[in-house]
Amino acid sequence: MRSLKIINSIIAAFILPFAFSGCEEPYNPPVISASNHYLVVEGTICSGTTTFRLTRSNNLSKPNNINFVSDARVRIESTSNETYNLSNKDSGYYELRGLVLNQSHQYRIKIEADGKEYVSEYVEVKTAPAIGDITWESQPDGVQLFVNTSDPSGKTRFYRWEYEETWQFHSSLMSTLIFKDSIKYFRTPEEDIYECFASARSNGIYLGTPLSPQSTEIIHQPLTKVTLKSTRLQMFYSILVKQNAIDEKEFEYWQNLKKMTESVGTIFDPQPAQYRGNIKCITNENELVLGYVSASNIAEKRIFIDRADLPSNYIFETEYDGCNVFEEDSRTIIGYKSGTYVPINSVTNMETGKVTYYYGFVTCIDCRRNGTKTKPDYWPQ
């Protein structure tokens, strides 16, 4: 899935040079706060599980807000007059499970949102060849992943990759105690809140094509880099790579989009309207819609990376930096009751018999704040 930040970057790359080109007085044109809420369609029609995300782009004054479209009607239509409705999930996600694409048919997406109707072009179903290998290299600031693939038949020349990450991590402080009904109890293994799992989808544009017309192979294609500025590599990490076979037209669309988001932008850069995909608003043909919908039988491959296989000198910079342990006092119980504090452990002075309790902030202790206790079915450990 493409991140909404990509869309905002496209709009910003064209507008910002005009907004900040003055030498003496800053000029804030109305376009910065204009309500350019273009529909953004992210997803691929594919066999198995098809997921689409609908959002609306933001103006430049609020670049980090995500406007999910959660009340739309989304369906897949085929040239054989078959219709498949996607279920409305949460946060703008729409999903259909169990779809089987027929390569003799063409498919498109149809969306009804905010009183308007949008459709993509009918597209042929492409089948991605199997992924060869997913490899990785440890570097001073993290792990760089690569993908290898080939199509001996020569039918596939253009590729786009997406991925899903899952990782096992732990919080900063381990708590052996629970505060309940004004009493502290020892935690059972089932009540552990030290180790959790988290996941994320790709939010970049990853493309590839053989280096020469005579070649059918892609070797050591950079995918994503997992840096040390998160808990991803802290314990055990997994990545599921999804490989899409696309045509040259779609490849050029994503390639131009990628170049645009990576450039600073000048007055000579193309306008966002020139990056139209294959989706249009049939209610208002002048309305810009962002996204490119394709149909593909995708290829998938998963690998795991164990922390034990990484350099021992890796130091992670995470949200847990700065966590400390504090000695309990008469006021700590207020924090226990509000859920701000969590008891950690206790120490008994062997000479006096005095028991001293220690606590920490819940954000440093409860891993569920950043993940879930549910272990994925595919997890090997």
Image (spheres, rainbow, N blue to C red):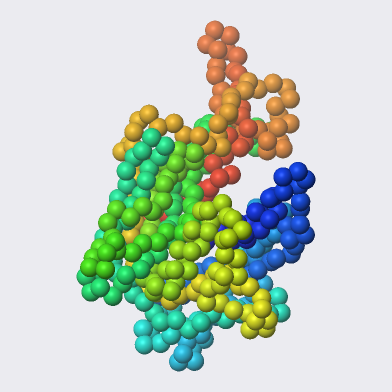
Residue closest to the eye, 374 or 87: 87
State the residue at coordinates (58%, 26%): 324
Residue closest to the eye, 215 or 244: 215
State the residue at coordinates (45%, 81%): 123
State the residue at coordinates (63%, 84%): 282
Give percent across and percent down for residue 338: 72, 37
For residue 242, say whether it is visible.
no
Q: Is residue 62 left or right of residue 207?
A: right
The part of the image, by quadrant, that contains residue 286 is bottom right
The relative height of residue 311 versus residue 300 in the rendered view (above or below) is: above
Q: Is residue 217 left or right of residue 347?
A: left
Residue that sits furthest to the front in the current view:
23
The relative height of residue 9 versus residue 338 in the rendered view (above or below) is: below
Give percent across and percent down for residue 104: 36, 87
Residue closest to the eye, 189 or 274: 274
State the residue at coordinates (33%, 60%): 301
